[in-house]
Image (cartoon, rainbow, N blue to C red):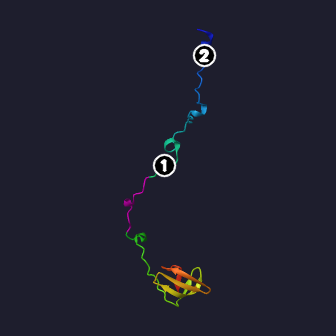
Amino acid sequence: MPAASRAAAERPPRPRAGTHDHDTPPTRTPVPPGREPPGPEGRILVLMKPAHAASRRLLPGSPFNVLPVDLPVEQFTVRDQVTHDKYGLGRVVLVEDDDAVIVSFGSRRVRVLSPFATLTKL
């Protein structure tokens, strides 16, 4: 056997083009028993089971089972004195078909829409 081919036979094979040491997956270090990471590949986040609404039991005395009651909409007439959470004391100037009222707060007139949550009759 020629000397050149004998040297090639003794030499370790060369890595192929495009491969590097960092292309190989890292080896995992041994983990003591009972300390294994949860789930596949040690991931912490796992998918949760969907909640089934049918499996929840409704308690008859629970306040959460009661449907909300619609409070009656307060009726205003012209010249009613009212107070507003933002604008303060005012007087109703115009009522528009129970959908809105126009209130005069001194130098400012404001149109307040129904259900008048921010408006209180005095």
Q: Is residue 101 left or right of residue 62?
A: right
Q: Please tell me the numbered disc located at residue 46.
A: 1
Q: Nearer the viewer, residue 51 or 57?
A: 51
Q: Which mark is residue 5?
A: none
Label 1 sits on what residue type? Val
Magenta stretch mostly in which secondary structure? loop
Residue shown at 42%/71% (left/top)? Answer: 63
Q: Can residue 47 be seen in this snapshot? A: yes
Q: List the single residue furthest toward the top.
A: 1
Q: Which residues are magenta?
A: 49-59
Q: Amino acid at mark 2?
A: Ala
Residue that numbered label 2 is attached to: 8
Which quadrant is the N terminus positioned in? top right
Pointer 1 and pointer 2: residues touching (CB < 8 Å)?
no
30 vs 69: above or below: above
- In the depicted view, which residue is nearer to us: 23 or 37? 23
